[in-house]
Amino acid sequence: MKTERLTMAQALVRFLAAQHVERDGVTQRALAGMFGIFGHGNVAGVGQALHQHRDRLTYRQARNEQAMVHAAIGYARMKDRLQMLACTTSIGPGATNMITGAAAATIDRIPVLLLPGDVFASRRPDPVLQQLEGPGRGDISVNDAFRPVSRYWDRITRPEQIVPAALAAMRVLTSPADTGAVTLSLCQDVQTEAFDVPLSFLEDRAWHIDRRMPDPDALARAIALVRGAKRPLLVAGGGVIYSAATDALRRLCDATGIPVAETQAGKGSLRFDHPSAVGAVGVTGTLAANRIARDADVVIGIGTRWSDLTTMSKSAFERADVRFINVNVAEFDAQKHSGIALVGDARATLEALSSITYHVDDAYRTEIASVRGEWGKEVDRLYGLGNAPLPARSEIIGAVNEAAGERGVVVCAAGAMPGDLHRLWRARDPKQYHVEYGYSTMGYEIAGALGVKMAAPDREVFVLVGDGSYLMLHTEIVTAVELGLKLTVVLVDDQGFASIGGLSRSVGSEEFGTKRSAPVDFVANARSLGAAAVRAKTVGDLRSALKEAQKAKRTTVIVVEADRYAGVPSYASWWDVAVAETSEQEGVRKARKAYEEAKRRQRWHV
């Protein structure tokens, strides 16, 4: 076997640069580059290898380790999980700063490769700087904290171990069913040690992503169930978009008239103005979708993991005889709710289902059109609310939606805004709506948008971020400016944590611990980071600022103060947030009574 002598880190960088992903006959590089912050635990290993091979794998410097993972998530999601980024840090706080991002990637099923440095494998200089010692174990490290939030985890204690570990990492990163964060903990001495690397390990390699079909018998049962349905509903999850199944979904709806509701990850699967589109479903759902869901007799979930927000904590689908069909590449998700499990690719399965001879009856079609019409008027009302003296969040969303047009991308993650966006945003394109809500990660917004812009430099990227998230993590504004990647950041000042403030009021706790009293000059802060920044006092000011930002060549931050209490109604939704069973506070006692009444709608889908 022919070999080349390289350090473990050099072999890894060469390997990553040679990996490709192939789907539907299209082949592209799997790793589009690496974010990194260097310390003593990786500068002489991965850092040296990246410097030596910088023509093979692009390196980008970040300002915060958590943020660079968020950027990698945004990039891979925008690329339908067919391309990804790696992130490297030193051992210690640099490594553990990435854990939040790793959790988000794994929960959201987004491929990200994490390469933290680790302690010395030789153990001779122990305890080294930033080493966690355990009296009961000699091999423990802070990187063990990545185990529960990684789809694949390994520690490299000998240089030749990188060969099987890197291959296993790519298998998981390119798996539609098993993907998420992959962590290879690289012992800092081992990164610099050389071994004879098989040349076949360094050669170009393509990982094929197939479009597997579900079991024919299960498919036949599902088709029979749909044919007998009177009030079917299709729930589109993120899998519809990741598998490029949006056209197949539209054709199925055109042929059958089945209405489509969308999860957070699936929003944009169908244009908002399609006759079958009833909008967001669940806790953050529209009145149209939640009405249809309540009385649905057959629910077809495609590419969804059926989170509590989607099912309203299992209170959304109220019919006693409701049945589920689950289309998912992951058997784990396909088996949920005791449904007919169609384990397979979303696009291939939708194409198979489109051959069904079925159409909803005229009465159901009329009902769908009616609730759609009512909802359209409600969105118009909320977009033009005219709230004073401060604008409502719904008006701010309306202005950004208008500015985004057909192809602008909105990025958001946590707080009150994602729920309002899910209900109100009129998505015209499958990639226009980018909200991280599987982990609802505060601080994701600006960093995630950086990754979105890297993946789609020809599209305008709008960030909607609350003051709470902004204060947690805004440093990647510097990275965006440095890389020449333009973002338009709409910073909505809610004077604290507005979402949890509302939740606190609903459980009788009077917004305890959720308001901000310290004044913050957000405009000055954004300018100090290199962005252009302005303050918008009215919705009219915001619209003007958005137009100017679109003309600009660098990142712009628009600060607008919002009415903390002018929220969007809940539209017959409910979320299981447990209320104290006993309390001296009258508000809590009232909230507990309402909670117990609402829980009667909850059910098991077994």
Image (spheres, grey):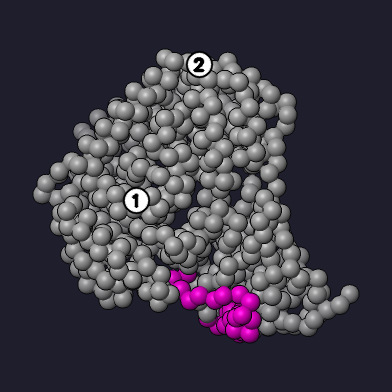
Please tell me whether residue 48 belongs to the stretch shown in magenta: yes
Please tell me whether residue 216 belongs to the stretch shown in magenta: no
The answer to which image quadrant residue 593 occupies is: top left
* Residue 154 seen from this side: no
Q: Position of residue 3 (x, y in %)?
A: 83, 79
Q: Residue at x 27, y 71 (%)?
A: 532
Label whose residue precedes the other's in the sequence (2 or 1) = 2
Q: Residue at x 42, y 34 (%)?
A: 274
Residue at which label 2 appears: 230
Q: Amino acid at mark 1?
A: Gly
Q: Residue at x 43, y 40 (%)?
A: 271
Image-based side of 554 in relation to 393, left or right: right
Residue at which label 1 appears: 405
Which region is colored magenta? Answer: 39-65
How far apart are the two marked residues, 2 and 1, measured between alpha carbons? 37 Å
Image-based side of 103 in relation to 388, left or right: right
Q: Is 600 drawn above or below residue 264 in the view shown?
A: above
Q: Position of residue 233 (x, y in %)?
A: 49, 26
User: In terms of secondary structure, where does tag 1 sit?
Assistant: loop
Image-based side of 366 in relation to 13, left or right: left
Q: Nearer the viewer, mark 2 or mark 1?
A: 1
Mark carried by residue 553? none
User: In terms of secondary structure, where does tag 2 sit?
Assistant: loop
Q: Residue at x 52, y 79 (%)?
A: 38
The answer to which image quadrant residue 4 occupies is: bottom right
Q: Is 247 drawn above or below residue 410 in the view shown?
A: above
Quadrant for the C terminus in the image: top right
